[in-house]
Amino acid sequence: MNLKQSKKLLEVLAACYWVLAATVYLVAGQQFHYTAVTSDALSATTTVGELVDGMTITQRVIAPAEFLTGFDLMAATYGRSNSGTLHAALVNDAGEAIAAQDVDIATLPESKYFTIPLDDMVEVQAGEPLTLTLTTTGCTPGNAVTIYCGDTIVAGRFDIVQSISEADRYTVNGVPGTGRLCIKINGIRVLTFYRDYWLIIGGAFTALALLCLHWWRGAKAGHNNPLVAVCMLFTRYGFLIRQLVSRDFKAKYKRSVLGMAWSFLNPLLTMSVQYVVFSALFKSDVPNYPVYLLSGIVFFNFFSEAVSMGMTSITGNASLIKKVYMPKYIYPVSRILSSLVNFALAIIPLLLVMLITGTAFTPALLLLIFDMLCLLGFVTGMSLLLTTAMTFFQDTQFLWGVVSMMWMYLTPLFYPESIIPAQFLTVYHMNPMYQYITFARICIIDGVSPEPMAYLWCILSSLVVLGLGILTFKRHQDKFVLYL
């Protein structure tokens, strides 16, 4: 290992680390301080009836955050110019009214959610049970607002009936109804992550620096370790990596009339087909569906292609491995880098669709660098695991075909997350590809940074799988030649 070149490489990587850390903090600063939250609401299936004077409607709700800013309520006026005042109040379990707001009924929209903002944010305990009370003044039959309720959620074109206990139903003058009011509680959750951000970043850098120092001393003593492998990859074998990547890239489009253009056309054509098939089912539930769909396709295609190519990197280069000695990790790495080139080209159609659909280009797009680096680490780990398995067990490629297809359907590429039953969401969110794709969609479609936990999930899934892949590959690589 050329220690002088390796030292420069480590200095460049350290600079990139701090540049990325500063970029994330500057772009995601607001989301690291607080986040707006809204409780879920049921779909409107019927009405409670007109809310006239002398009638009191109550509904048990749960505070979604530490500060409440208001709530959205769905109501109908049937096109009438109703008059009167709607009185809304939030009461805690001690019977104290912690917030109250009056609304001029004449200003209410027709059959839509309308927002009732609170004049001042109300501080509560997140998860605290509250009671919403609705009454009116000056409202008589035929001159009153009608309140919507329901007991279902809509998933695509399907209605899923929810089981609602009697304690959770709305009441009219103390008598339980048949469902829940169509209401969303709005709040702000205060985060403290921004206070600890630089402490975490500095601590992580210190730990990495000490680990690299330990490896550096080992490298000077002639021992192999991950630091040696990375440095050799960029210094001694850089030219070879470029040749292997070029070979794989050219082989993919050999004898193809359109050639490299397929890197642009493939995600666009896939999106077009799936858009036609699924837009009727899910378009109404997903804002900016074309970008939603294409972003999922582009990121998952990179994962699928890179892992599939990396899986056969050892068996596919058997003749070369038997004749020429090179570190065996070069072969899966070159395949992954080849897929990374296709991934970069596929981003261009995504940007084009964003432009066509009027999606805003915000600074949050810079956060995709973090997401892509985590995805690259995860893909590398998966490739190292599967190429090891493939060398000893040739049926791995067929099993992976089934697993990758199942993985695709378990990831929200073309359908909204809302169709997943609530009891399965915890397990569903443990899918690493869900985390990477959701992270990207928040940056692209919403134009903001995800919450700090999203960063943690991406880093953990990437490092755990990458670590397992490296350990497995390193432990078995000396036996590869016996099975080729």
Image (spheres, rainbow, N blue to C red):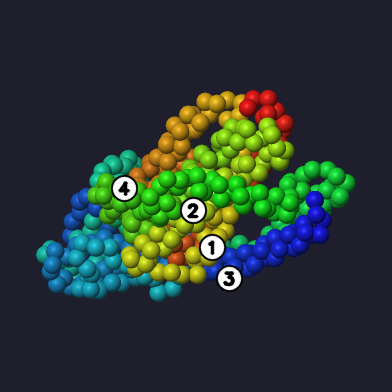
Q: Residue 373 sits in which quadrant?
A: bottom right
| Residue at the limit of the structure toward the right, as seen here | 221
Q: How far across and down, in percent of the image, does residue 42 sit?
A: 31, 51
Q: How far across and down, in percent of the image, does residue 231 sit?
A: 74, 52
- Identify the residue position indicated by label 3 in the image: 26
- Identify the residue position indicated by label 4 in the image: 274
Sequence-first disc among 2 and 4: 4
Say if mark 3 contacts mark 2, CB within 8 Å.
no
Within-10-Å neighbours for mark 1: few <14, some 14–19, many 20+: many
- Single out the mark in the foreground, 4 or 1: 4
Quadrant in which the C terminus is drawn: top right
Q: CA distance from mark 4 to mark 1?
A: 27 Å
What amino acid is labelled 4 in the image? Answer: Gln
Element marked by disc 4:
helix
Sequence-first disc among 4 and 1: 4
Q: CA distance from mark 1 to mark 2?
A: 17 Å
**Image vertical order of residue 182 relative to residue 254, above or below:** below
Please say whether residue 94 is visible from this viewpoint.
no
The mark found on residue 343 in the picture is 2
